[in-house]
């Protein structure tokens, strides 16, 4: 097998050496928009918004933004996506074979997002580009001989009465792996199709000694749980005792930093962590070079991007988008500005607000980092705390009190006329809740003047409780959010947070 690894490594390096791209990011994006509009011009959506006229315009991007409104899930689903569950050629040619059910981190219900065959091709295309960019890393050739462990949600999809199949996007992607993937993909489609998380985890732990893993991909919280189960089941000190060539971890779904120290404890040697931005709506970005966790936008893969400043130019104080927000394209983005992401894709998503906020870390390389969610913006009384700032406070508290805090939840609760922030931290280690509360409150005041002002006015206090990981997983199980690619909200609305607290008290 050594010769195979050498061949793959040489092929990756050769592809990178021979590739030559003379087009600018703006030119690529115009090409992608033109391709999308051309393909969908005869759909109901394309006719309604006169894609033919947009295609004939000198400035295709400007005309597209002028004619087609910005959509969120509620508006595009009600007017368009529901129709294509039964009818063809609504927002994209044909009927989607799949609908991805999101993990429901925002809103009360899971979203049902169309997944077309062209979307699946786009995901594979971005994946191929990510493999090509591995040439930027100095990985030894033997890594490419090894198997890849990918932890998805269940690949056993449910058939809807209208004919399409539905499940979470990771399960849909796994179910569409060609048969030859079975030569290197683990845990394999059979185990991936197990619905029950605890049963699937137990099967993985049992089969792990039979695998030779070089790379792992999945959401950090659930990957950690699986690695710990493998270590316990097989009597190991760390995962490298069973998978000595495990070298690459491809993270995604949530910010990795709050999990870094936990990964270091289950590993016997240093690994390379790559970040990915794979959502139900598309594979948007990935880490493409060493010494950064920032991700390169996929600009040439059937996706057109727009960016709405996540400030007063684009949103009101409650986090809702303005009726006429400022919208910029790739050539006008700036560093150190948070943007809400709009995408148009080959699944028939048009000027669709994904719900994530991003920030450009490198303009020349078109690299980004995810800073949070538009709805995970804690601003009930003007505190203006983004998910990035909340994560930073948790990291600082972890270091100050020498504890592992991977997961947390926070929200604003009203008592009489006043509000307070309620934190729920997940750790199995001892923690002085009062000292931690005071420390995080102080750090957030230092880092955010709006929070400091809010604490002097309507935000009258901060409360904090610590719960065990076992209790946390019991809560996730009660909410049917246990395992695979499930993400849980870091910022909760008051009603949901009260229900969480009630569960913990029970």
Image: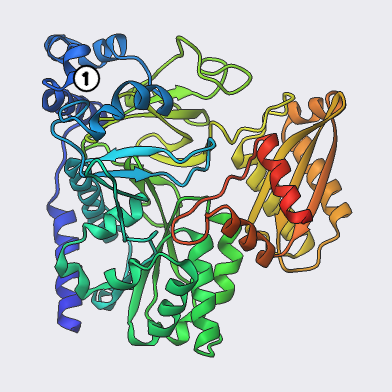
| 346 lies left or right of 42 | right
Q: Residue at x 49, y 62 (%)?
A: 483
| 18 lies left or right of 383 | left
Q: Residue at x 35, y 24 (%)?
A: 76
Is residue 186 visible in the rendered image? The answer is no
Camera-nearest residue between 377 and 424? 424
**Location of residue 102 in the rendering, given as x and y in whole percent from the top left corner:** 42, 44
For this orientation, the residue located farthest to the front is 161
Query: Quadrant of residue 164 in the image?
Result: top left
- Circle 1 is placed at which residue position? 45
**Location of residue 411 in the rendering, given as x and y in whole percent from the top left corner:** 70, 38
Camera-nearest residue between 38 and 416? 416
The quadrant of the picture occupied by the N terminus is bottom left
The quadrant of the picture occupied by the C terminus is bottom right
**Location of residue 45 in the rendering, given as x and y in whole percent from the top left corner:** 22, 19
Camera-nearest residue between 312 and 461? 461
Query: Quadrant of residue 154 in the image?
Result: bottom left
Query: Quadrant of residue 452 in the image?
Result: top right
């Amino acid at each position: 097998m050594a010769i195979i690894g050498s061949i793959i490594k040489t092929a990756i390096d050769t592809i990178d050496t021979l590739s030559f791209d003379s087009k600018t990011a703006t030119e690529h994006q115009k090409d992608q928009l033109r391709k999308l509009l051309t393909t969908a011009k005869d759909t109901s959506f394309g006719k309604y918004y006169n894609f033919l006229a947009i295609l004939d315009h000198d400035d295709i991007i400007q005309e597209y933004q002028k004619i087609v409104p910005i959509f969120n899930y509620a508006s595009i689903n009600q007017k368009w996506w529901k129709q294509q569950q039964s009818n063809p050629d609504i927002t994209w040619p044909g009927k989607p074979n799949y609908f991805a059910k999101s993990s429901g981190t925002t809103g009360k219900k899971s979203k049902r997002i169309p997944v077309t065959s062209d979307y699946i091709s786009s995901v594979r295309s971005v994946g191929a580009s990510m493999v090509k960019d591995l040439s930027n890393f100095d990985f030894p050739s033997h890594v490419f001989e090894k198997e890849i462990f990918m932890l998805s949600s269940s690949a056993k999809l449910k058939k809807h009465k209208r004919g399409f199949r539905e499940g979470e996007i990771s399960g849909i992607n796994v179910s569409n792996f060609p048969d030859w993937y079975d030569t290197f993909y683990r845990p394999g489609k059979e185990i991936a199709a197990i619905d029950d998380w605890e049963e699937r985890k137990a099967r993985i732990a049992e089969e792990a000694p039979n695998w030779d893993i070089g790379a792992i991909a999945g959401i950090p919280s659930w990957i950690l749980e699986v690695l710990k189960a493998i270590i316990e089941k097989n009597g190991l000190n760390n995962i490298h005792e069973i998978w000595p060539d495990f070298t690459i971890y491809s993270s995604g779904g949530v910010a990795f930093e709050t999990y870094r120290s936990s990964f270091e404890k289950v590993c016997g040697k240093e690994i390379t962590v790559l970040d990915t931005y794979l959502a139900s709506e598309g594979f948007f970005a990935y880490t493409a070079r060493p010494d950064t966790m920032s991700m390169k936008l996929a600009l040439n893969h059937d996706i057109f991007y727009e960016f709405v400043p996540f400030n007063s130019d684009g949103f009101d104080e409650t986090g809702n988008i303005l009726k006429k927000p400022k919208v910029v394209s790739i050539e006008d983005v700036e560093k150190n500005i948070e943007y809400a992401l709009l995408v148009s894709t080959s699944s028939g998503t048009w000027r669709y607000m994904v719900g994530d906020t991003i920030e450009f870390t490198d303009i020349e390389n078109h690299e980004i980092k995810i800073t949070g969610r538009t709805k995970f913006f804690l601003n009930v009384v003007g505190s203006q705390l983004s998910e990035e700032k909340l994560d930073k406070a948790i990291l600082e508290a972890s270091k100050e009190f020498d504890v592992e805090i991977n997961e947390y939840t926070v929200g604003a609760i009203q008592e009489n006329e006043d509000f307070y922030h309620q934190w729920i931290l997940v750790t199995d280690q001892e923690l002085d809740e009062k000292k931690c509360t005071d420390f995080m409150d102080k750090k957030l005041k230092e880092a955010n003047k709006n929070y400091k002002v809010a604490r002097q006015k309507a935000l009258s206090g901060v409360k904090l409780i610590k719960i065990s990981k076992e209790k946390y997983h019991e809560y996730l199980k009660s909410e049917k959010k246990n395992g695979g690619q499930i993400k849980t909200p870091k910022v909760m609305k008051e009603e949901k947070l009260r229900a969480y607290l009630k569960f913990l008290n029970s």
